Amino acid sequence: MKILIVAATRFEVRPLADKFAYVQKEDDSLAHYQFRNNKVDILITGMGMTPMAYYLGKQLPGSNYDVVINAGICGSFSDALPIGTVVNVIEESFCELGAEDNNQFLSLFELGLMDPDEPPFRSGKLLNNSTPKGSVLRKLDRVKGITASTIHGHPETIRKIRELFHPDVESMEGAAFFYACLTSSVPFHQVRSISNFVEERDKSKWDIPLALANLNKALFDIVKENAS
């Protein structure tokens, strides 16, 4: 089996990488590992949609991965998803792709600039309808994500985002990851752990160490379960 783990930052997946046998470094972004009889590549893209799209655009063609997993931390919009919860993001939206019309936000689909069903979109959303392989993935909460260039921290902005997209979580790379994998027709999953609530910014309430510990445990369990 050939697996690609994609993360925005190295620290998000360092504990996972330490469990694999190091093979070699391709370049500053890509390293090769071995786990049992499986090849595991770890790709570090940098934060944000543009680096994620660029490095996946370079890596996916001709690589023949059996599965690609985007791993990272995220913010939660829901009290039902407390800090430390690991989730399986199955729907993504570019929440800033559009135009402001006075106090109203209009997406590119609403503006008539894009067909909401033009692949890889379906009704303006990016969807992962694949059936998770293994009990670890199946047990994770299946959630809706939004992807933004700016993490939300203003009450009025958060209220509008809730009304428009009804999200469960937010990240800075998820929708770009979905777009690349759907366009490349490669099996994929986005696995994230809650590090904070989406609210007025107060990092004293965040728990990144807990989020990372839970994320890396879940990731290793997923790899073990799918490994031959």
Image: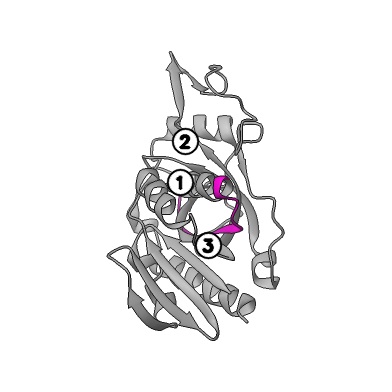
Identify residue type, mark 3. Answer: Ile
Task: Identify residue for label 1.
Answer: 198
Residue furthest top in the image:
102
Secondary-structure class at tag 1: loop
First of labels 3, 1 by sequence position: 3
* Relative image position of residue 62 (x, y in whole percent): 50, 58
Colour convention of the picture: one colour
Q: Mark 2 touching mark 1, by CB under 8 A?
A: yes
Q: Quadrant of residue 13?
A: bottom left
Q: Residues within 10 Å of mark 3 (few under 14, many from 20)?
A: many
Labelled disc at residue 158: 2
Identify residue type, mark 2. Answer: Ile
Labelled disc at residue 69: 3
First of labels 2, 1 by sequence position: 2
Labels 3, 2: front one? 3
Q: Label 3 vs label 2: CA separation? A: 28 Å
